[in-house]
Image (spheres, grey):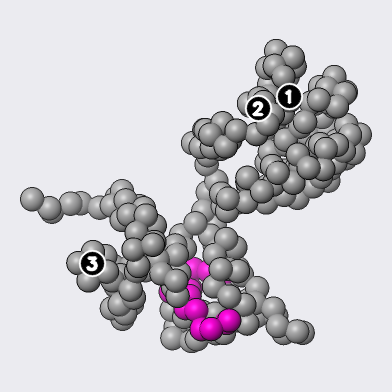
Amino acid sequence: MEYTYNIIDSDAASNLQLQHYLEGYGDFTCVGEAKNADDGLNAILKFSPDIVFVNLNDKAFSYFSMVKELHQYVQDIPVLIGISKSKEYAYEAIKNNFFDYWLLPYNEFDIRKTILRLKKQMPKEATSQTICLKSYKDFHYLDTDEILYLKADNNATDFIMKDGRVISAFKTLKTFEKQLPDNFVRVHQSYILNINYVSRINYGKSICALKTDNTQLPFSKSYRANIDGLKRNLSKNTISTLN
């Protein structure tokens, strides 16, 4: 479900700021960074990212040459997004099939529109994932499809599994919140649910019930937006009987 990306930018501050914005979406992972066209080409060939962000202010035409050269080595060109302080290179970016062009300083609204358009045009297929719980020299691998929910336990987190096992990890719930696939939703300070196992949402009692054993877990007002999103998600392929 994740989109991988490279950043080609000689400005370290701009690079970090972009990564900060993308972290907010939870499904974007930086796999390579470069400061010039040669290193950028090498990083693209090495990591095969889905998206490449290019700051065009520093020797823009060397980056356009890099894009043309890229066609010699790969069949599927990554999504290219140009970044610049002015519109000076916008026409050339369009000629080189850039997906979008952002003006600095970064505008959060522009980023959000691009990300949503990208996800709509190139959705990632959901795949079964494995999460690794590491503790010293112990590595515990869990199939995320088998996780019912996560529960906070002081500074640890309990993974409640479909087969009844409870597996503890010595990290906070927040640590796992952005690492899990999109079908996991935070509904309470102490709970993250796998939406694939939710059978009921009761707004009056502020609870979610699970399919397996009708376990009822609370949700809180601070996560009401997540609950509303969960309800919309579950309703997409549901036959409604409401009057």
Q: Which residue corresponds to the image point at 34% horizontal and 59% vertical from the top-left?
A: 224
What's the amino acid at mark 3?
Asn
* Residue sticking out furthest to the right: 38
The local secondary structure at tag 3 comes to strand
Give me the disc on residue 102: 2
* 68 sits left or right of 158 in the view: right
Q: Give the range drawn in magenta.
A: 143-156
What is the spatial separation of the Cα atoms under label 3 and label 1, in whole angstroms? 50 Å
Q: Which residue corresponds to the image point at 75% horizontal and 84% vertical from the top-left?
A: 136
* 189 sits left or right of 54 in the view: left
- On the question of residue 193 being in view, the answer is no
Asked if residue 90 lies in the magenta stretch, the reply is: no
Q: Which residue corresponds to the image point at 20% horizontal and 51% vertical from the top-left?
A: 239
Q: Nearer the viewer, mark 3 or mark 1?
A: 1
Q: Which residue corresponds to the image point at 56% horizontal and 31% vertical from the top-left?
A: 110
Label 2 crowd bin: few (<14), some (14–19), many (20+), radius 10 Å: many
Residue 82 position in % (x across, y down): 71, 27
Label 1 crowd bin: few (<14), some (14–19), many (20+), radius 10 Å: some
Q: First in sequence: mark 3 or mark 2?
A: 2
Residue 174 position in % (x across, y down): 56, 68
Q: Is 117 placed above or below 157 here? A: above
Residue 125 position in % (x across, y down): 53, 49
47 or 20, nearer to the observer: 20
Q: How many marks can you see?
A: 3
Quarter of the image for residue 74 reads top right
What's the amino acid at mark 2?
Trp
Residue 204 position in % (x across, y down): 20, 67
Q: Main secondary structure of the magenta part?
A: strand
* 239 sits left or right of 118 in the view: left
Quarter of the image for residue 70 reads top right
Give me the disc on residue 202: 3
The residue beneath circle 1 is 85
